[in-house]
Image (tube, rainbow, N blue to C red):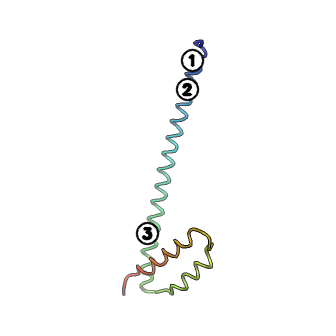
Amino acid sequence: MSDLALGQVVELIAKVTNDVRRMGELSTEQSEQLLRVIDDLAAGLMAIQAVTAVQLKTNPVDPDAVHAWLTDHMDPDGEGTDKARAVANILMESAPAS
C-alpha cells in the first residue's frame, strides 16, 4: 500500500473515530436531558398527588364515578387504562383521614 493510500486510510479512521465520539457525547447529553425531564415529571406528579389527596379529604369522590370517567375517556385496550385505575385507587385510598 502506498504512503498516499495509507495516509488516506488513517485520515478516514480518524474521521470515523471523531464521529463515533461525537455520537457518544450526543447520546449522553440526550440521556441526561431525558432523565431531567423524567425527574421534573415525577416531581409534578407527586405534587398533584399531594394536592389531590388533601382535596379528597374535604371533598370525597365516588370511586364508581371515577372509574366510569376513566372508562369514558381512555382506550379500553390501551396499556395505561389499568395503570390509571390503580393510580386513582391509590389516590382515593391515600386521602388523609379527617
| Mark 3 burial class by Cα count in 10 Å: few <14, some 14-19, many 20+ | few
Cα–Cα gap, marks 1 and 3: 58 Å
Nearer the camera: disc 1 or disc 3: 1
Q: Residue drawn 58% across and 82% down? A: 68
Q: Secondary structure at mark 3?
A: helix
Is 25 rendered above or below residue 77?
Answer: above
Q: Secondary structure at mark 2?
A: helix
Location of the N terminus (image quadrant):
top right
Cα–Cα gap, marks 2 and 1: 10 Å
Q: Give the amino acid type for the residue marked by disc 2 in the picture.
A: Ile
Q: Give the amino acid type for the residue marked by disc 1 in the picture.
A: Gly
Q: Give the amino acid type for the residue marked by disc 3 in the picture.
A: Met
Nearer the camera: disc 3 or disc 2: 2
- Residue 80 pos. (x, y %): 56, 69
Q: Which mark is residue 13?
A: 2
- Residue 42 pos. (x, y %): 45, 64
Q: Which mark is residue 46?
A: 3
Q: Residue drawn 55% across and 34% down? A: 19
Q: Badge 1 is on which residue?
A: 7
- Residue 52 pos. (x, y %): 46, 78
Instruction: Name the N-terminal-most of marks 3 and 2.
Output: 2
Q: Residue drawn 52% across and 71% down? A: 83
Instruction: Name the N-terminal-most of marks 2 and 1.
Output: 1
